[in-house]
């Protein structure tokens, strides 16, 4: 076990974004609960030129909300690096969307997969507008039994908050969830709201923003699990 961990926060920091206010608090609460120290560094996507060099010193990477990013390619490169190097990864909101996009392109052969916010006319619109935008909304979610996220929450249902307009296009779920990626949380209509990579040290992405719980003084279960994964040696 390590007493000090370093985490890279990949995204374009904006002090006005609620999730960006919550993330440092969530990490600190989770670190205190575990009894370790945590050091965080915000990495603007525009600064990412070589993810393997820039992220090698960190124990984990969190791809944060508030997309579109200044440098989508840089965000995707960062996600690919931690996925292929078996480093702990957490993606929330925009981080979820881009984790799904990276996996579709580089693990599922969907090279033309894209985000409709960036390219509305994409040939493979993997991430598209939600039928009902989830702007400052909450919804109840069913957690799939035996998944990492279900073990983190220690229950099979949770209610979480959002600030997003885009989600996973149901048309491509069969292509996406056939190579080890698991849909681990769904809303009442069955839409995917979280996914994780089977066999990976820690690779979890949520469309919702669990970090918001920290603004109420709660330790977010997902963030606690992420911190635990970073703190434990391979």
Image (cartoon, helix red, strand yellow):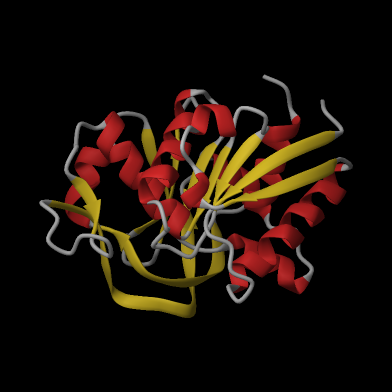
Seen at 31% across and 66% down, the residue is 189
In the image, residue 10 above or below residue 69: above
In the image, residue 220 above or below residue 233: below
In the image, residue 220 above or below residue 217: above
Residue 128 is at least partly visible in this image: yes
- Snapshot quadrant of residue 191: bottom left
Q: Residue furthest top?
A: 234
Residue 87 is at least partly visible in this image: no
Residue 197 in picture, x, y percent from top left:
44, 34
- Report the quarter where the C terminus lies: top right
Compared across the picture, whether 186 is left or right of 153 comes to left
- Report the quarter where the N terminus lies: top right
Residue 19 in picture, x, y percent from top left:
60, 67
Residue 180 in picture, x, y percent from top left:
36, 30
Compared across the picture, whether 182 is left or right of 20 comes to left
In the image, residue 172 above or below residue 128: above
Seen at 77% across and 51% down, the residue is 30
Compared across the picture, whether 7 is left or right of 17 comes to right
Question: Which is more toward the observer, 114 or 182?
Answer: 114
Seen at 26% across and 40% down, the residue is 176
Residue 48 in picture, x, y percent from top left:
49, 42
Question: Which is more toward the observer, 60 or 41?
Answer: 41
Numbered disc total? 0
- Snapshot quadrant of residue 156: bottom right
């Amino acid at each position: 076990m390590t007493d000090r961990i370093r985490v890279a926060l990949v995204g374009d920091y904006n002090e006005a974004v609620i999730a960006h206010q919550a993330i440092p608090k969530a990490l600190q609460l989770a670190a205190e609960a575990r009894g370790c120290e945590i050091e965080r560094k915000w990495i603007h996507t525009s600064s990412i030129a070589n993810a393997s060099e820039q992220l090698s010193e960190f124990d984990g990477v969190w791809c944060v909300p508030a997309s579109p990013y200044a440098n989508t390619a840089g965000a995707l490169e960062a996600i690919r690096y931690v996925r292929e190097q078996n480093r702990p990864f957490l993606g929330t909101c925009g981080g979820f969307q881009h984790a799904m996009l990276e996996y579709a392109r580089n693990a599922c052969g969907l090279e033309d997969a894209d985000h409709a916010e960036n390219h509305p006319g994409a040939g493979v619109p993997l991430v598209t507008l939600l039928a009902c935008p989830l702007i400052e909304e909450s919804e109840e979610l069913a957690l799939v039994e035996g998944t990492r996220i279900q073990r983190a929450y220690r229950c099979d249902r949770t209610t979480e908050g959002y600030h997003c307009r885009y989600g996973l296009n149901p048309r491509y779920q069969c292509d996406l969830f056939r190579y080890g990626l698991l849909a681990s949380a769904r809303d009442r209509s069955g839409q995917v709201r979280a996914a994780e990579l089977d066999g990976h040290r820690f690779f979890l992405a949520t469309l919702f923003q669990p970090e918001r719980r920290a603004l109420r003084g709660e330790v977010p279960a997902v963030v606690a699990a992420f911190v635990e994964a970073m703190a434990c040696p391979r």
